[in-house]
Amino acid sequence: MNLELLIPLVIYLCAMLGLGFWLSRRPQEGSFVQDYFLGNRSMGGFVLAMTMVATYASASSFIGGPGAAYRMGLGWVLLAMIQVPTVWLTLGVLGKQFAHIARRVNALTINDMLYARYRSPLVVILAALGLLAAFVATMVVQFIGGARLLETVTGLPYQGGLVIFATTVLLYTLIGGFRAVVITDAVQGVLMLLGTLVLLAGVLHAGGGAGAMFSALSEIDPGLVEPRGPDGFLGTSFMLSFWVLVCFGVIGLPHSAIRCLAYKDSGAMHKGIIIGTLIGALLMFGMHFAGALGRVLLPELSVPDKVMPTLMLTVLPPIVAGLFLAGPMAAIMSTIDSQLIQASATLVKDLYLNYLSRTPPSPTAIKRASRLVTLVLGLVVLWAALSPPDMIIWLNLLAFGALQAIFFWPLVLGLYWWRGNATGALASMVTGAVCYGLLTTLGIKPLGLHAIVPSLALSGLAYVFGSLSTAPPTTEVRQLFGRD
């Protein structure tokens, strides 16, 4: 076991726990539910930017994405840059409208927003079930990524790394709630950026510069320096699918959209867009470029997902590697804590308090239930992560697509098309989920496209036809959403 690497990581994990505990000791503002699940809408611009970037840049981005670049070459680096506008798109399309309406109706979750727009318990229940199923899959990916990181750099067995990682994330999320999640996200976002830049500099130095490494890649396989990758894998259909899945469609991801409810004011949103887009661009380029160049330094790596931690061990001094391995660890932790707190909010706030509780529970009972649900969800995900696949990026993209197929049109058209109603939303959610599930399960790719493209197209048509074939929303809803 490599103590020079293990000690900095243990210090980092303890610091995150300490930060969560300190935040939990601060005076609570407002109700426990609002504080625990939304942090009392108090995020400033820098924290908003960093939590958006950190939430999106997950194990798939820091572990799976560079692993794909290691296998596919520089073409995957270009493809990954499609993700740069994600913060700008999410905050630009949803941010201002979401924030204003959420304050009017005291919405604390995405499902609160859906109910305010569609006034249908069935829409909320279907959305909640879809969110929970997809979040379990994406949280499994994050747990696998964290465990593999600890396994690679410390010599711990996979299961041991998994338990340590899961315990840390669960504890600081349980203790501090949403406020701990976003503040630790901001700290982790800085570490992610520093770790990426230090690693890329180390890789370029070890490989003798970009020019020499490009030549070496070409000798391994000329396709590694071609835009379309080895064997033309990155074709037009694949690129279009990727653009929809990890750029345009990200607007429909609930764990990113929830940030649009929690910032302080419009100034914070504008700063968040600028800072988040710049930081996101540096992260996406740095980590994928390092992964692609890693093929030169580590040509025989058997598991591509291990390229980032293995590169850090190879090109950096042990104590420096230990410090900056917190970067990929931060990427993983900052995504799973956000999904964990939102999944808990879905079960406690959206389902239990709204539909299952016959009498209003006491604040103490709500607090106990919220933390118990968070703990149980974490344990379920921990159990599911005990048998990991070789490459986690495909599982993560699968869950991403499911969330988008369900939420994209009800969120976007719900804000910008006054005629949309509950029938349209239900039709869109069911069509998107069924179409995506069937195409993915059967391996059908119309025109070579990923299942998300036809699923979004059909679910969008279902939303329009379902809405136009039934009565328009009430005057109250139209006035609330600024359409009357």
Image (cartoon, rainbow, N blue to C red):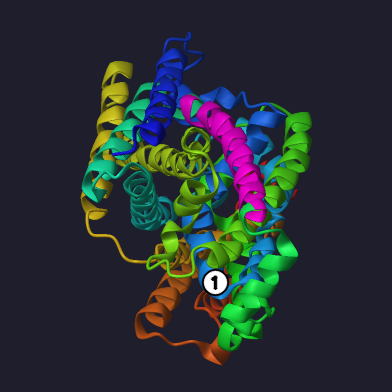
Place of residue 155 in the rendered image (x, y in percent of width and height, measured from the top left): 29, 45
Q: Position of residue 193 (x, y in %)?
A: 63, 40
- Vertical side of 357 occupied by 16: above or below: above
Q: Nearer the viewer, residue 140 or 472?
A: 140
Question: Could one spot residue 106 in this view of the protein?
Answer: no
* Res 49 visible: yes
User: In this image, 259 relative to 59: left or right?
Assistant: right
Q: Quadrant of the N terminus?
A: top left
**Magenta region includes residue 190:** yes
Residue 213 placed where, x, y %? 66, 66
Residue 218's image quarter? bottom right
Q: Residue at x 54, y 60 (%)?
A: 66
**In the foreground, 374 or 157:** 157
Residue 107 image point, x, y percent: 53, 35
> Which class describes the residues within 10 Å of circle 1: few (<14), some (14-19), or many (20+)?
many
Tell me the element at label 1.
helix
Name the chief secondary structure element in magenta. helix
* 224 falls in the magenta region: no
For mark 1, what is the residue?
Answer: 466
Mark 1 residue type: Gly
Residue displayed at 71% across by 59% down: 209
Magenta residues, as a range? 180-205
| Side (left or right) of 363 relative to 448 | left
Which one is nearer the viewer's eye here, 132 or 440? 440
Q: Residue at x 44, y 56 (%)?
A: 123
